[in-house]
Amino acid sequence: MALNVVDMTPAIGAELIIDKADLLSGAHAEEIRTLVRQRGVVFVRGAHLEEAEQLKVSHSLGKVQEAGKEGLQNISLDKEISISADYLRGSFFWHIDGASDDMPNFAATLNPKKLTDPPASTYFANTYAAYDALPDAEKKQYDTLKVVHSLEASQRMVTPEPSYETIRIWQTHRPKKVHPLVWTHVDGRKSFLLGATADYVQEMSIEEGRALLTKLRDWATQPQFVYKHEWEYGDFLIWDNTGTMHRVDPYPVDSGRLLIRTTIDGEEQVA
């Protein structure tokens, strides 16, 4: 049976209409993977997946990273339940996960367990569509540029006056990485590799490069390239981390907000 898909905007986002049994069966896994690549972010309303079920679906989509409990990670600002709570404050800013890795993760899933009131929304920006919409002259200009990404760049947004010890932790935990500004994927499509980790452009002065990265972030996060997900209990959401940026609305540290995440390993190096 063909999947029933409802596009949320012309450029990004789709609701997948599928019953829980079909989702868990894995029979549509390849179709869902293709849909995630095409639409950037896909979600199912009313799935109400248990954690073991979320893990089962995730395994059908690719290799699940061994993080958290058997690949299940607590996404929360509460340090009692999330070992990454300090770093997760960076999720308030546009970013691509693992942008300072050789091979950023392919995708991730989210399953809300406790939401704020009203729920803090999550936003996704299609970096394929943002690149495609540029004039050819600008594409040619950007295709050869290299960008330095670092955890430090993103964490300075959260902690603008860090201690020396904190800076050293950032720098050693995830060293800086040079990537093309434009990622040419194995299928020939191109997307921007931008976000909070993008520190400066190698071929430009620091000032010029940071101005350009800001300009392109603003371009890529225009409404026509963005899908806003308004969370409901029972949602199950998957996004393509290689072709989108994402961020969440700021919410109080003590709100108790908790989403369960799985992360699907990367499958292609940045080139």
Image (cartoon, grey):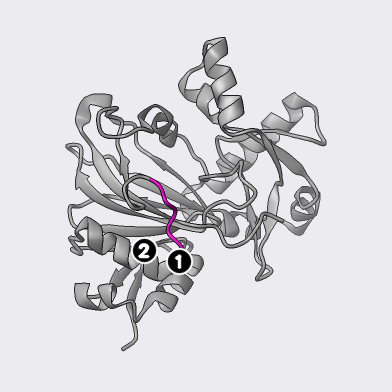
Residue pictured at 61% horizontal, 41% vertical: 100
Q: CA distance from mark 2 to mark 1?
A: 7 Å
Amino acid type of disc 2? Answer: Ser
| Magenta span | 63-67
Q: Is residue 230 magenta?
A: no
- Residue 153 makes an appearance in the image: no
Relative to 143, residue 114 above or below:
above
Main SS category, magenta section: loop
Relative to 169, residue 219 above or below:
below
Residue pictured at 32% horizontal, 67% vertical: 57
Near mark 1 (Cα within 10 A), the count class, few <14, some 14-19 or many ≥20, is some
Q: Element type at marker 1?
A: loop
2 and 1 marks in contact (CB < 8 Å): yes
x then y, percent, for residue 39: 46, 65
Relative to 181, residue 4 above or below:
below
Residue pictured at 76% horizontal, 43% vertical: 146
Residue nearest the observer in this picture, 136 or 106:
106
Q: Element type at marker 2?
A: helix
The reply, left or right, for residue 43 in relation to residue 171 is left
Q: Which residue is mark 2?
A: 58
Relative to 78, residue 22 above or below:
below
The reply, left or right, for residue 260 in relation to residue 92 is left
Near mark 2 (Cα within 10 A), the count class, few <14, some 14-19 or many ≥20, is many
- Residue 220 makes an appearance in the image: yes
